[in-house]
Amino acid sequence: MRQGAGALFLGVCATVLAIAGADDPYRFFTWNVTYGDIYPLGVRQQGILINGQFPGPDIFSVTNDNLIINVINSLTEPFLLSWNGIQQRRNSYEDGVYGTTCPIPPGQNFTYILQVKDQIGSFYYFPSLAFHKAAGGFGGIRILSRPLIPVPFPPPAGDYTVLIGDWYKANHTALKATLDNGNMLPFPDGILINGRGSGASFTVEKGKTYRLRISNVGLMNSLNFRIQGHKLVLVEVEGTHTVQNTYSSVDVHVGQSLSVLVTADQPAQDYYVVVSSRFTSPVLTTTGVFHYSNSAGSVSGPIPGGPTTEVDWSLNQARSIRTNLTASGPRPNPQGSYHYGMVNTTRTIRIANSAGPVNGKQRYAVNSVSFVPADTPLKLADYFKIDGVYRVGSISDNPTGGGIYLDTSVMRADYRAYIEIVFENNEDILQSWHLDGYSFFVVGMDGGQWTPASRNQYNLRDGVARCNIQVYPKSWSAIYIPLDNVGMWNLRSEFWARQYLGQQFYLQVYTTSTSLRDEYPIPKNALLCGRASGRHTRPL
């Protein structure tokens, strides 16, 4: 640990009760982030390791746990981790994206203080700066239900994290340079399963049922997951217990997470685990092994095929994913007890993505605004009342149809408002969006242009609540969100080159209240940078 880091960590722990839930359990982690050689596709690359691991270690937690994660940056460049799907209730300072959190300088550390308040389910963490995500630094997060809260399926015999994603042989620095020079990235070179281009294995016992927590941690492509000769029973999507539909394969769009149950009910041998790209030409495919512990033979037969470019197949599967209304969520009351479809929305925001050149370089935009980071995290600018860092209203509620321009785009919305967001995709490729700080209700998706009449087909009863939403080519998707979490929240494309080149903005959920019931104060150990440098948070 760096000099002084230990003392600071102890100081943070001594004061953590001021922020985290004092009556809930604590889990402590110390992570050293380093470079290291990795060979996922058979070529040496500079990987980003956490405690020497690629992918990084899983986080095991239970609803309401406090997670105290001391991250030591042993890289030669600034670093941040963000927590995909962890809602950071009242605490966007800990979100780990540049709009909220100062980067950890090389050779220094920062202790994240997170609480998985009122959450269950499958998520992941990832590095949010530069193009680090193309080098590793990601890992699974699982949040189990508290012991007395019923779960709508028997305890599985085993619980596996399955991190899938497309991958490049090029180093992350070369990919970043390509984007910085105004060019688009080439097609990826392969697909990884838990950091391996081939050879990932999952051992099972015949007759038993296993939970697979699948997250697409890749950079651009939707992926299809399947296991030769076995059915997949969907049970959870990003913290929501779902109607338990059975599928032969599932699409997992970039940034998304879900859980399936798989029963080892076939003759005892090895079977292919297959992951392949969707909506691409050519189709990338990789395989792993579903290994019976008493296997009589290795994998055999042709690799099972899956859907390739069929949009309707994926759209119909997406529409079939619905909330299990009678199951308990993080609390004992049924998930269906919140009747989201009976609340009138107070505002409609229409979001349209676009692509084009700005000053001769490739950029991507939301409602014609291509996001550029400010010199100071936006949340710190709010706290210290630093003028000129960003401008509220720098992005419109509706597509403008105009040319792309650069700005630090921030949209303000009222705390406790109930809003509708419609994502409109007029491009020929699938889009995948994520909103930090929230779980929202997916109420509809379809091809063509959205109009107010599209609301007639909304699912206002059992749409799934999640934090990522796909939008099919030349299509739209709509969500409802109760804005019950004050803070500065990143709304971004999960197509990583697109978010890096501007397809993102920040949603400022705003209140004039300064009550701790609405938002926690700035962490005492918050790093300060940009125009906030040299200022003071609160006494340690």
Image (cartoon, rainbow, N blue to C red):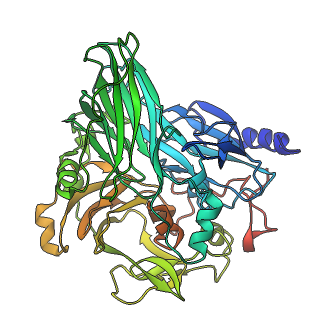
Residue 231, image x, y percentages? 23, 29
Identify the residue at image location x=25%, y=27%: 230
* Among the 4 quarters of the image, the one containing residue 205: top left
Residue 2, image x, y percentages? 85, 44
- The residue lying toward the viewer, choosing from 47 and 333, is 47
Identify the residue at image location x=36%, y=79%: 397
The N terminus lies in quadrant: top right
- The residue lying toward the viewer, choosing from 150 and 241, is 241
Q: Is residue 56 above or below residue 266?
A: below
- The residue lying toward the viewer, choosing from 217 and 520, is 217
Identify the residue at image location x=21%, y=61%: 445
* Among the 4 quarters of the image, the one containing residue 387: bottom right
121 relative position to 69: left or right? left
- The residue lying toward the viewer, choosing from 492 and 172, is 172
Residue at the far front in the pictured view: 301
Question: Is residue 483 at all visible to an observer of this figure?
Answer: no
Residue 104, image x, y percentages? 73, 56
Question: Is residue 469 at all visible to an observer of this figure?
Answer: yes
156 relative position to 36: left or right? left
The count of marks equals 0
Identify the residue at image location x=79%, y=38%: 10
Residue 394, image x, y percentages? 48, 83
